[in-house]
Amino acid sequence: MIQLEHPALFKTQSYINGRWVEASTGAAIQVYNPFDQTLLGSVPDLGVEDCTRAIEAAAAAFQEWRDYTAAKRSKILRRWYELQLEHVDDLAKILTLEQGKPVAEAKGEIRYGASFVEWFAEEAKRVYGDVIPGHGSDKRITVIKQPVGVVGAITPWNFPNAMITRKIAPALAAGCTVVIKPSELTPFSALALAELAAQAGFPPGVINILTTSDAAAIGKELTSNPKVKKISFTGSTRVGKILLRQAADSVKKVSMELGGNAPFIVFDDADVEAAVEGAIASKFRNAGQTCVCSNRIFAQEKVYDEFVTKLAAAIQDITIGNGMEKGVNVGPLIEPKALSFVETLVQDAVDKGATVLAGGKKAVNHDLIFEPTLITEPSTEMMVYREEIFGPVAPVFKFSSEAEVIALANDTNYGLASYFYGRDYARIWRVAEALEYGMVGINTGMISTTVAPFGGIKESGFGREGSKYGIDDYVNIKYMCWGGVS
């Protein structure tokens, strides 16, 4: 049992139709701390029957929730936001214990996640329509926006709080109801949010949380059930493609935030120290387990040696360990297969001629912590060039010209995030426009914010989360033509 200031936040049951429930089969999932593998607790292992029940509850609740005034929905969302900030310490502790990231970073995620609830509490009152000049003297045209209906949201383990709020806050603001499937590795953060949602005053059935180990079966039910009108998924491109195929049969509205292979470019006129700082923030946050982490770092020939020397020194200052301990910067990877994959990537690079300048192996006395690693002189034949690393490994490639690095940066099926450092404003414009990515960080390694549209292109998905655009995926546009006015 996790010790909290407010123990009611630690829930071990799923949440359907305003009730805390067990699986209909009685099955359960055990959840472990990735740092030391201690058992944190268990949650119900729900099946398709339970999922269908949650969908039906959400569909029934939609009839009431959509008819709430925007101001009434806004007030409830605002209270949910306030409760999350009031309980930031407990929510962060739950998150760190089940996910592993340092508690200071976890608190940052809680505040980041809550900011979406605050933002869309305000946007709920701004889902405006239009009056369009008619095409005839007796015609008038109006356009309104209406909630799509029940939303199925599937969220990952790396940001178990913020990925939920970023998806469902705009859905709820628009008047939709939601069925959420969090990762079975990190269910407690989702359930804590449900407890606070109940306290905030959401009616039964508006928010439903399904814990399960059978992601494929639940995903199939969410994508095939005709009562679900919209799917929002964050996860791998492979799974995203499966869900897209399944959702196609009922032509659901879909948004996808999938894999990434972010370039991080350092031009020869860059502030190298600032670039190192940005690379550390972008690469090693959450032990490298974010979709927008810099994956391939490119440094121009003139500054390559200076950059890698300073980056190596900065990596040495990173403190690894238990995320609950003060001063720790990097915690464990989420599970053994994640560590094994990172080990494979590093070994492949070494076997093909790269040099490990820092780190390069599993940390001593820590089963799932991989040392922050710097690889120099890698090549495009190595796995670290093609694969999404999802770990604390930074390969730094050397390049000579702007044209060369643009070609290298775009040489991937992914198109989520990208970064570059430089001072020449003409080149900044050229490069920013040439990078085939949904998001570009210019002289910064941190780009995520509530007020900007988050999302990718190519095989990194489509749709945008956050900002004024974030609510668009949860509404249908209805055109009404009024005749006989003259």
Image: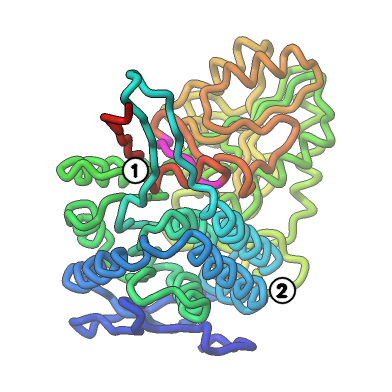
The residue type indicated by label 1 comes to: Asn
Instruction: Pick the quarter of the image with the C terminus.
Output: top left
Q: Out of 10 and 81, give the one closest to the viewer.
A: 81
- Tell which of 40 and 372 is nearer to you: 40
Asked which secondary structure carries label 1, the reply is strand
Is 280 colored magenta in this rendering? no
- Asked which secondary structure carries label 2, the reply is loop
Identify the residue at horizontal 54%, vertical 48% (top origin).
126
Q: Can residue 29 be seen in this view?
A: no
Answer left or right for 254 relative to 38: left
Q: Is residue 456 above or below residue 89?
A: above
Q: Could you say which disc has been placed on residue 325 in the image?
A: 2
Who's the residue at 84% across and 36% down the image?
Answer: 273
Residue 325 appears in the figure? yes
Q: Which region of the structure is painted magenta? A: 460-466
Q: Disc 1 and disc 2: Cα gap in Å?
A: 47 Å
The answer to whether the residues at label 1 and label 2 have Cβ atoms under 8 Å apart is no
In x, y percent, where is residue 147?
36, 51
Q: Where is residue 346 in the image (x, y as percent from the top left)?
A: 53, 42
Assess whether residue 463 is covered by the magenta stretch: yes
